[in-house]
Image (tube, rainbow, N blue to C red):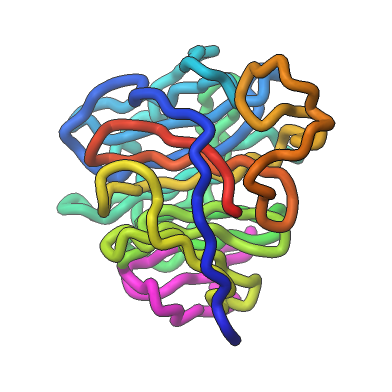
Amino acid sequence: MSRQQLHFFKTGSYPFPYKTRGSDTALTVSYHKGEPSLAFLTQTGHEADIVFLRLYRRNPEETGRFSSPKNYWRISGMAYDRAQNRLWATEGSGSLHEHADSIIGIDADSGAHVDTIIVPFSDSHALAFNGQYFLRSDGSALEMIDRAGNILATLHVPIGSNCRGLSSAPWTYIASDTLSNKLVILSLFGQVVAECDAPPGEPGGIEAVAFDGIQDYTTLSQFPESSVDPAIPWSPDPWNFRHTVYLANQKDQTIYFGYFY
């Protein structure tokens, strides 16, 4: 199957909510106390906060934050379960090897640790959830996991251990091939169907990806908080349909957002 070559059109950016010298940044789009939000977490070397930012704004607007659940200080991937208003999170193994056999559920309003799914031990780098099953980057392949923690399939895709960010999108997944400095679109069967070779920011810094599947972009202008009539076509024309993808660049400590075209 030939791969479509895509470009990324940046519509905005802002700095991380807090600075860090760490790594393993996680993003997902979620609701937080009824507000469509970008949930952000990155490692600081100590207790880490999950911060919520309003979606699609020119400037960052924080709507709330809470600490990672107790003793879960190495979260490296997050996804969102809209039906249960729950953040799902996974940890890298690091040197402690404490929770790399778990996917934990966090209430997106209170921060309470409400569920734990035991999964095969792995040095997890990223996590996505499509409403039915999880997709986890295990450092050498992608694993499809059900809600009971069973591995349904192992996808040996070319990005392998380079995958540092994952997000579910309609009929696809968006992944960051970080070491190669590109974004890839994966089919539900693990095929690479499209690539974007020039994500914004410092090369090799994209540690997390979040597709906004909450807001209706047919009712929004091309640029955040723009007074332009939403009915005016976006230019360049978006790939497939109007959408926004958030990217966290660990190297330059910046969150970028825009769309594929």
Q: Point out the residue furthest to the bottom here.
A: 1
Q: Quadrant of residue 123?
A: bottom left
Q: Residue at x 71, y 36 (%)?
A: 214
Task: Please give the count of numbered marks on the rendered protein.
Answer: 0
Q: Position of residue 221 (x, y in %)?
A: 71, 28
Please state, as top left, top right, bottom left or bottom right, where the C terminus lies in the image.
Answer: bottom right
Residue at 34%, 48% (x, y): give it.
206
- For the magenta stretch, what is the residue range? 137-161
User: Which residue is at the front of the view, 44 or 255?
Assistant: 255
The picture places residue 88, in percent across and down from the top left corner, at 54, 44
Compare residues 114 and 248 and report the one nearer the observer. 248
Query: Residue 116, relative to residue 40: is it above or below?
Result: below
Q: Is residue 157 magenta?
A: yes
Front-most of 92 and 137?
137
Give the percent coordinates (x, y) of residue 168.
61, 54
Question: Relative to residue 137, is residue 38 depicted above or below?
Answer: above
Q: Is residue 105 visible?
A: no
The relative height of residue 109 versus residue 30 in the rendered view (above or below) is above
> Does 55 sit above or below residue 172?
above
Determine whether, in the image, residue 43 is placed left or right of residue 114.
Answer: left
Does residue 113 appear to the left or right of 90 in the view shown?
right
Q: Which residue appears at 66% of the width and 56% of the height?
A: 239
